[in-house]
Image (cartoon, helix red, strand yellow):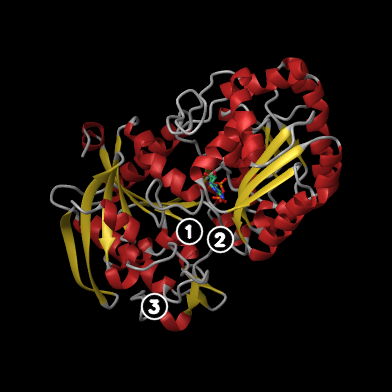
């Protein structure tokens, strides 16, 4: 362990993704960044991950710290290793995790049929590790990320452990539902299958297990924390969350400001002021085969799913392109959306460049070259792309929802007069509002002095973990101290 990690109070994070090893979205970025952020606050996190092939490759020199003869029907062991500044515990269970494809989907793009067992095994291993410890190491707090880690409190309580858990919601759209007939196969305590436990309309909900079983709940922005209490956003769990409202904390995500630093980023021509973006902009125009023009150059880097509102953007786009605006999109996801964007790109060559795929380096070049980054999400728990946009001096044009509204200062008259605006915020799920926001972008672009000022504001906006790391640390400390006070 690094000196900083070794000297802090021990905590265990449990997650299904962790950058840089395995990532499908923002969850991985946050799980990967929290250990360093919390090390500055006196906490030493170890992160338990499934032993997917990419994780096992990083764990080649790991040592075994625990073994299971029968973990939900399969032998397994836990390996400990350091990787990229992270202290990892890897659940090596080949029958569950040694497969091609992504963390949740097979190569055919469908959920693995045994996802319930795969992630229940992760939770069961977490509970046993935390409860028994490894040598002298025993976590004071468990930090559980999304439904894949949600069953941990149920297994802990079944063992009689009072170790405190913080359940983090990164996206409430995913519940981890499985039929009640799976209770025994997943070794879940049947007494937990109630409306106050993990039962959800006749199914087992792994996320609900976390929400009802953890001592505290966190989500990734104050805005989303408020929204989650409403039927429009709570996805059927709003009642559960209302009952736990005093224990629900909205804490904004930060980004890794070393990895995302336009002054040192190896993927781009580095710069420290908006004027320095020019070479990156020229390359971006080139990369996407766009024609040089008078309008702003916007980008989208996103999963292509209904959540992200990119179907709305397709409808709002014609006016923007007609005003000389150009757009480069990088994304992958739902087939219908991919095809719709490819067709739109083919219809507007030179103005709209579309790349279907997942490309980390290209995403860096896009933030560096862009004048604006569009995030028209229907809902967005926190959102990271608008934070990268701010950091790279590309103005975020975002829907007024969740963490987007918490992180961007809209260019209204007052903010412009005060010289503090960092982007444009529009009503969510409204094509006219989105079209109007794109119109405002074009208008602001005409006044380069104002545009540059906004870019400078954006680049100065704090987007790291400075504010949020102490909040997590305070929560961990409160949970741990309460537990000590309650333990006879
Ligand atoms: P979500 O987790 O809902 O997908 P976030 O904004 O929280 O949304 O995080 C998305 C992360 O994934 C960001 O780091 C973004 O840059 C990255 N990303 C999304 N799509 C792509 C892509 N096609 N290529 C490269 N990076 C991508």
Q: Could you tell me if the residues under marks 1 and 2 are in contact, i.e. CB atoms within 8 Å? A: yes
Q: Secondary structure at mark 1?
A: helix
Residue at screen point 58% across, 18% down = 273
Label 1: how many Cα within 10 Å (few below 14, some 14–19, many 20+): many
Locate residue 56, reporting x and y percent. 28, 57
Label 3: how many Cα within 10 Å (few below 14, some 14–19, many 20+): few
Q: Secondary structure at mark 3?
A: helix
Locate residue 135, reporting x and y percent. 13, 51
**Mark linked to residue 240:** 2
Q: Earlier in the sequence, mark 1 or mark 2?
A: 1
- Identify residue for label 3: 190
Q: Earlier in the sequence, mark 3 or mark 2?
A: 3
Relative to residue 177, is residue 128 drawn left or right? left
Residue at screen point 44% across, 60% down = 210
Q: CA distance from mark 1 to mark 3?
A: 17 Å
Q: Earlier in the sequence, mark 1 or mark 3?
A: 3
Q: Secondary structure at mark 2?
A: helix
Residue 226 or 195: which is nearer the viewer?
226
Relative to residue 118, is residue 303 drawn left or right? right
Q: CA distance from mark 3 to mark 2?
A: 20 Å
Residue at screen point 68% across, 30% down = 371
Quadrant of image for the N terminus: top left
């Amino acid at each position: 362990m690094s000196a900083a990690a070794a000297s802090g109070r021990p905590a265990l994070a449990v997650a299904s993704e962790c950058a840089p090893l395995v990532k499908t979205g923002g969850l991985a970025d946050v799980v990967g960044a929290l250990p360093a952020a919390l090390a500055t606050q006196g906490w030493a996190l170890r992160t338990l991950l499934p032993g997917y092939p990419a994780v096992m490759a990083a764990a080649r020199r790991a040592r075994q710290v625990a073994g299971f003869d029968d973990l939900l029907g399969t032998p397994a062991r836990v390996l400990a290793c350091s990787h990229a500044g992270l202290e990892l515990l890897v659940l090596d269970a080949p029958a569950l995790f040694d497969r091609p494809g992504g963390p949740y989907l097979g190569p055919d793009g469908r959920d693995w049929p045994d996802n319930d067992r795969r992630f229940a095994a992760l939770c069961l291993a977490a509970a046993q590790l935390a409860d028994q410890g490894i040598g002298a190491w025993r976590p004071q707090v468990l930090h559980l990320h999304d439904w894949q880690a949600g069953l941990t409190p149920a297994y802990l309580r079944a063992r009689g452990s009072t170790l405190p858990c913080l359940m983090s919601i990164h996206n409430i759209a995913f519940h981890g539902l499985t039929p009640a007939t799976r209770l025994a196969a997943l070794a879940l305590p049947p007494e937990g299958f109630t409306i106050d436990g993990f039962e959800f309309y006749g199914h087992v909900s792994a996320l609900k297990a976390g929400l009802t079983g953890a001592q505290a709940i966190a989500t990734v922005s104050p805005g989303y924390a408020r929204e989650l209490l409403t039927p429009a956003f709570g996805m059927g769990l709003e009642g559960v969350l209302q009952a736990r409202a005093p224990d629900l904390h909205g804490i904004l995500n930060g980004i890794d400001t070393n990895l995302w630093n336009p002054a040192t980023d190896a993927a781009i021509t580095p710069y420290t002021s908006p004027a320095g973006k020019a070479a990156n902009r020229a390359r971006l125009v080139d990369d996407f085969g766009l024609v040089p023009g008078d309008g702003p150059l916007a980008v989208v880097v996103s999963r292509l799913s209904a959540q992200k509102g990119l179907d709305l953007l397709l409808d709002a786009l014609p006016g923007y392109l007609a005003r000389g605006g150009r757009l480069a999109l990088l994304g992958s996801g739902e087939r219908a959306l991919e095809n719709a964007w490819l067709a739109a790109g083919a219809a507007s060559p030179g103005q709209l460049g579309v790349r279907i795929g997942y490309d980390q380096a290209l995403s860096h070049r896009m933030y560096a070259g862009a004048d604006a980054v569009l995030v028209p999400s229907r809902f967005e728990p926190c959102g990271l792309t608008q934070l990268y946009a701010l950091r790279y001096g590309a103005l975020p044009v975002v829907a007024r929802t969740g963490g987007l509204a918490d992180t961007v200062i809209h260019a209204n008259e007052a903010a412009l007069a005060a010289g503090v605006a960092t982007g444009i915020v529009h009503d969510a799920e409204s094509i006219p509002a989105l079209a109007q926001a794109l119109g405002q972008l074009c208008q602001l672009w005409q006044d380069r002095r104002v545009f540059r000022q906004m870019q400078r504001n954006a680049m100065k906006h704090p987007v790291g973990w400075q504010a949020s790391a102490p909040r997590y640390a305070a929560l961990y400390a409160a949970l741990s101290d309460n537990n000590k006070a309650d333990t006879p």
